[in-house]
Image (spheres, rainbow, N blue to C red):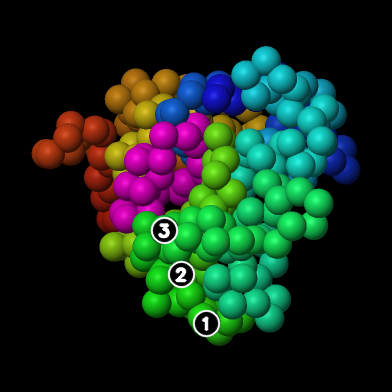
Amino acid sequence: MNLTLDDLSVRRGGAALLRELSLRVPDGQVVGLVGPNGSGKSTALRCVYRALRPNAGTVWLDDEELPRMSARHAAQHVAAMTQDADLDLDFTVTEMLALGRTPHLRGGRTPGRAERELCERVMDQVGIRELAHRGVVTLSGGERQRVLLARALVQEPRVLILDEPTNHLDLRHQTELLSLLRRQEVSVLVVLHDLNLAAAACDRLGVLAAGRLVAAGTPEDVLSAELVREVFGVRASVVPHPLNGCPQLLFDLDHPATR
């Protein structure tokens, strides 16, 4: 399923948070949004998962306008892993994952055997089976992140929206999570701060600065030393990854900033 952000603009309190943002996520591809703090990345995602209504523009799923869909219909197609998810509920991990099936259960039907088996498969995929009977309030930040991802996958979406999913994760779980995303065969729009992970995980990147899209394309086309200097204010050298050739950034901590 193709996801298209079509000329989105968002203003709040007189400030322009997004300015005429247009970006396409082709079916089955992973597209990363990168940019400095306050550049509009999370705002763009909030427009997609309908937590925020843009002042102008819209979002399309194939040829259907997402804001015009019913909440249930939208949730059957789009799942989001957000930074502000409320996990202060006295639920076990298994119960939390079962909530991901809500859009697919009609007439108040409770999750049955098929839903339980799906939750178990996803727990195995994400590596949280040992947490199944733990209360979510007892989990570490990294464990909570993996539970949120699992709940989104249990939803069986066609489009997956993730806002900084690698937060709180150690190096192993960061790489495992991004590898898992690439195997999902769904359209993914993800905000990442680590440019090296973004280059390795994403088919395409969109670079935001001050609410505007300033570059878009493959990591090889987008990530240049000049762009990193102009957008992030950091000196960097760009070298190919020795195993897969994707661009990787090297930084000089003795001379980190350009301003």
Q: Name the residue under label 1.
A: 134
Give coordinates of residue 66: x percent, y percent: 74, 28
Numbered disc in front, either 3 or 1: 3
Q: Tag 3: Cα neighbours inside 10 Å, few (<14), some, or many (≥20)?
A: some
The kind of residue on which mark 1 rests is: Arg
Viewer-side residue, 188 vs 249: 188
Q: Residue 121: which disc?
A: 3
Q: Tell me the CA gap for discs 3 and 2.
A: 20 Å
Q: Tell me the CA gap for discs 3 and 1.
A: 17 Å
- Check disc 2 and report its element: helix, strand or loop: helix
Residue 66 shows in the view: yes
Q: How many labels does the image show?
A: 3
Residue ranking furthest to the left: 242
Q: Are marks 3 and 2 in contact (CB under 8 Å)?
A: no
Magenta span covers which residues?
174-195
Whether the magenta-drawn stretch holds residue 189 is answered as yes
Viewer-side residue, 217 vs 67: 67
Label located before the other in sequence (3 or 2): 3
Q: Name the residue under label 2.
A: 142
Q: In the rendered view, would you say 211 is above or below 75?
A: above
- Check disc 3 and report its element: helix, strand or loop: helix
Numbered disc in front, either 3 or 2: 3
Give coordinates of residue 21: x percent, y percent: 66, 24
